[in-house]
Image (cartoon, rainbow, N blue to C red):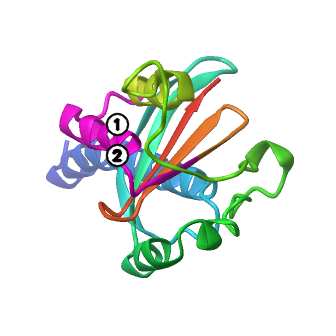
Amino acid sequence: MGLKIVVGIVCALLCVPLFVWGAWRLYEYRWYSGIIPEPLGISYSIEIGGESGLREGCGAAIFRMDEATARKIIERGPRYLARAMVSRGHHDSYHTFFGWKKTPFVSGNAHGESTGLSPGLDCASIDPALQWKITDALRAPGAYYTHGPETFLLVDPAARLIVLTYFG
């Protein structure tokens, strides 16, 4: 075989999987960022992960909130979040969120398992330090949370985090 053919085969073996991986990551970003309500500005994704079965799945998508959104939430709180009820990319009842509440979340469990947050975080296998930062935000004042069908959404303007978890 000629050198050009060998180089072409090696490139194909390396480039095709890399392209597929990149396309999948882009798809994940577009899908999960589309679930976040429009008024919540996203700078970039921090971590996206989960597990899926034939029909059901669980996981989390964690985004860095843009500075302008963080500032508006800190200044206006629930008044600003009142507009953040419908997903930016999916305008149906399944992708609608219910009323926003202030943290701390009060539950029998300090890490919010009964909220639907923890099962999604556990499925995502995210960095433990980030997971603790998220669950600490749920327990302290200054953040806000809401839920929708099979989803839980936490925004922490001080840490500039938007955390979407799903289970089901």
Which residue is at 74% across, 48% downward? 95
Q: Amino acid at mark 2?
A: Ala
Residue at 14% in and 51% down: 3
Disc sitting over residue 135 in the figure: 1
Q: Residue at x 42, y 20 (%)?
A: 109
Magenta extent = 124-145
Q: Nearer the viewer, residue 74 or 161?
A: 74
Q: Which residue is mark 2?
A: 140
Among the 4 quarters of the image, the one containing residue 116: top right
Queried whether the magenta region covers residue 120, the answer comes back as no
Residue closer to the observer: 63 or 7: 63
105 relative to 36 in the view: left or right: left
Label annotation for residue 168: none
Of badges 2 and 1, the one in the foreground is 2
Instruction: Tell me whether circle 2 and circle 1 mark residues in contact (CB < 8 Å).
Output: no
Residue 156: percent from the left, percent from the top? 40, 57
Number of dots carrying numbers: 2
Image quadrant containing the C terminus: top right
**Which quadrant of the structure image shows residue 49?**
top left
Instruction: Give the side of residue 91 with respect to residue 143, left or right.
Output: right
